[in-house]
Image (cartoon, coloured by chain):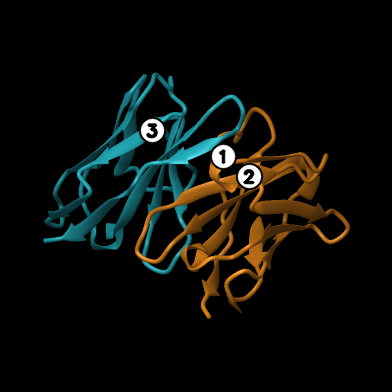
């Protein structure tokens, strides 16, 4: 089974800061990696699919990169409305999904 | 617009079963998979499995095989997730989400339902 790890587990940053979250897979997963944002009490929202593609309607300050085992999610300029937990998610050829443990982002 | 609307909160006793529904609108129901994901209080997201409403085919995470049943009723564009032999650690918010059945949006969930809280308590 593929294991997904994320780091850090939480972070605090100031408005306007650049924020970076990493996601690592236990095996090569090519580009089959997505990123979601979940605000408290809400359902997750898709931000990035296939490692680097911005979902329609998502602000351009969000971006993703990587392939193989190492992936990065970036918020170029943190906004107050970006306070949330961010999850990476892998999918395989059998359409089985695995989520990372999440990274909680707070305002300093 | 594309929307998934789930049934309301449930309280169940240990050993009982619960069935949560997810009603789809705004798209051809049989053209997409419905997945179920749960989130225990204060915890992360845990993928449970999917159903293909077109064929009735399903696939589950190993942990949930024998514990969960997923069905759908194409006449009312609704998917169901039934969890059996409930334990206190099944207390969680259960979400449904849509993915494509092939190509396109195959590997991700968008949109999601609003979530259904299932509480297991004696």
Are the two marked residues, 2 and 1, in contact with CB atoms closer than 8 angstroms? yes
Label 1's element?
Answer: helix
Colour chain A is painted in: cyan
Q: Nearer the viewer, mark 3 or mark 1?
A: 1
Q: Which chain is orange?
A: B
Alpha-carbon span between mark 2 and mark 1? 6 Å
Residue occupying image coordinates x 29% and y 57%: A82
Q: Are marks 3 and 1 in one subunit?
A: no
Foreground pick, B67 / A44: B67
Residue occupying image coordinates x 43% and y 19%: A30
Which residue in the structure is indicated by mark 2? B65
Residue occupying image coordinates x 83% and y 39%: B55
Label 2's element?
Answer: loop
Q: Quadrant of residue B26?
A: bottom right
The image's mark for residue B62 is: 1
Query: In the rendered structure, the residue with mark 2 lies on which chain?
Result: B
The answer to whether residue B1 shows anywhere in this view is no
Looking at the rendered structure, the number of numbered marks drawn on it comes to 3
Label 3's element?
Answer: loop
Where residue B13 sits in the image (x, y, percent)? 59, 76
Vertical position of residue A29 compared to residue A4: above or below: above
Where residue B82 sits in the image (x, y, percent)? 69, 60
Which residue in the structure is indicated by mark 3? A3
From the viewer's perspective, tell me whether residue A76 is left or right of residue A93: left
Where residue A2 sits in the image (x, y, percent)? 43, 29
Vertical position of residue B75 compared to residue B50: above or below: below
Vertical position of residue A27 compared to residue A99: above or below: above
Query: In the rendered structure, the residue with mark 3 lies on which chain?
Result: A
Alpha-carbon span between mark 3 and mark 1? 14 Å
Q: Quadrant of residue A14?
A: bottom left
Query: In the rendered structure, the residue with mark 1 lies on which chain?
Result: B
């Amino acid at each position: 089974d593929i294991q997904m790890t994320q780091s850090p587990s939480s972070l605090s940053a100031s408005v306007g800061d650049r924020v970076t979250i990493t996601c690592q897979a236990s095996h090569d997963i090519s580009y089959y990696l997505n990123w979601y944002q979940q605000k408290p009490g809400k359902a997750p929202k898709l931000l990035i699919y296939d490692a680097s593609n911005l979902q329609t309607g998502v602000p351009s300050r969000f971006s993703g990169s990587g392939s193989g085992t190492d992936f990065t999610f970036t918020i170029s300029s943190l906004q107050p409305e970006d306070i949330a937990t961010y999850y990476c998610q892998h999918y395989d050829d059998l359409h089985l999904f695995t989520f990372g443990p999440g990274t909680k982002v707070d305002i300093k | 617009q594309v929307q998934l609307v789930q049934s309301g909160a449930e309280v169940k006793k240990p050993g009982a079963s619960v069935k949560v529904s997810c009603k789809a609108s705004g798209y051809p129901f049989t053209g997409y998979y419905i997945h179920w994901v749960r989130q225990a209080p204060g915890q992360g997201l845990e993928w449970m499995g999917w159903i293909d409403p077109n064929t009735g085919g399903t696939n589950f995470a190993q942990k949930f095989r024998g514990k969960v049943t997923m069905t759908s009723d194409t006449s009312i564009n609704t998917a169901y997730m039934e969890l059996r032999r409930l334990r206190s650690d099944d207390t969680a918010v259960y979400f449904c989400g849509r993915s494509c059945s092939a190509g396109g949006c195959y590997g991700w969930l968008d949109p999601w339902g609003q979530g259904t809280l299932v509480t297991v308590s004696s």
